[in-house]
Image: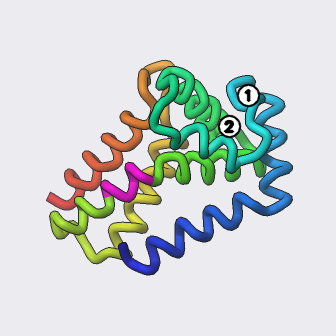
């Protein structure tokens, strides 16, 4: 991993611990029932990253975050940040494979992965998607391959 990639994750993690982020998270919790049981962003991410667990429930949580990310206002950025952190292990794998395929320099690939993920989340049609994480990650990697082949 490049330092820039670490710095991006550190920045996202740091911003998710701020008071204004917690307030935005609380606003999302009030409108999205799937998030109501999580007291803070760290508990939410812990629940999503835990290997065992109900995959269907995790998918409902991700769908709630996508709906919030597609809305207007400060809660939208909060939801997008949480989605990026939730998908981080998959995004990291895409980044590593893209560098291995020589799609671009590490920093360019990192920027491309994050931009494409943001675009994928904001444009996702939840009525046509069964599994949020798999769909977003596959689409991002597929688009990166297509663009650079």
Question: Pointer 2: residues within 10 angstroms few (<14), some, or many (20+)?
Answer: many
Q: Which residues are magenta?
A: 89-94
| 56 inside magenta stretch | no
Which of 44 and 120 lies nearest the eye of the viewer? 44
Residue 1: quarter of image:
bottom left
Question: Pointer 1: residues within 10 angstroms few (<14), some, or many (20+)?
Answer: some
Query: Where does residue 88 sit, x and y in percent of width and height?
Result: 46, 53
Q: Earlier in the sequence, mark 1 or mark 2?
A: 1
Residue displayed at 54% across by 42% down: 122
Tell me, yes or no, whether the two marked residues, 1 and 2, touch with CB atoms within 8 Å: yes
Residue wearing tag 2? 68
- Which is more foreground, mark 1 or mark 2? 1
Residue displayed at 81% across by 51% down: 22
Taking 37 as reference, is 138 above or below it?
below
Label total for image: 2
Residue wearing tag 1? 32
Q: Is residue 144 left or right of residue 92?
A: left
Which of 8 and 66 lies nearest the eye of the viewer? 8
Query: Where does residue 123 sit, x and y in percent of width and height?
Result: 50, 39
Residue displayed at 42% across by 27% down: 131
Query: What predominant SS class does the magenta segment belong to?
Result: helix
Which residue reaches farthest bottom? 3
Query: Where does residue 37 sit, x and y in percent of width and height?
Result: 75, 30
Taking 31 as reference, is 10 above or below it?
below
Q: Is residue 35 left or right of residue 133?
A: right
As drawn, the label of residue 99 is: none
Q: Secondary structure at mark 2?
A: helix
Quarter of the picture containing the C terminus is bottom left
Residue 99: quarter of image:
bottom left
Query: Where does residue 121 sit, x and y in percent of width and height?
Result: 51, 42
Q: Secondary structure at mark 1?
A: loop
The CA distance from mark 1 to mark 2 is 8 Å
């Amino acid at each position: 991993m490049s330092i820039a990639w670490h710095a991006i994750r550190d920045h996202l993690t740091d911003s998710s611990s701020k008071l204004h982020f917690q307030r935005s998270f609380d606003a999302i919790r009030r409108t999205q029932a799937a998030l109501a049981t999580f007291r803070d962003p760290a508990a939410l991410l812990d629940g999503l990253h835990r290997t065992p667990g109900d995959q269907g429930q995790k998918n409902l949580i991700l769908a709630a975050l996508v709906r919030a990310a597609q809305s207007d206002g400060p809660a939208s950025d909060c939801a997008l940040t949480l989605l990026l952190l939730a998908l981080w292990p998959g995004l990291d794998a895409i980044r590593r494979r893209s560098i291995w395929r020589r799609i671009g320099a590490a920093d360019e690939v990192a920027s491309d992965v994050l931009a494409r993920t943001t675009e994928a989340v904001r444009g996702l049609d939840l009525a046509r998607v069964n599994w949020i994480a798999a769909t977003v990650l596959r689409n991002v990697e597929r688009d990166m391959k297509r663009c650079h082949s």
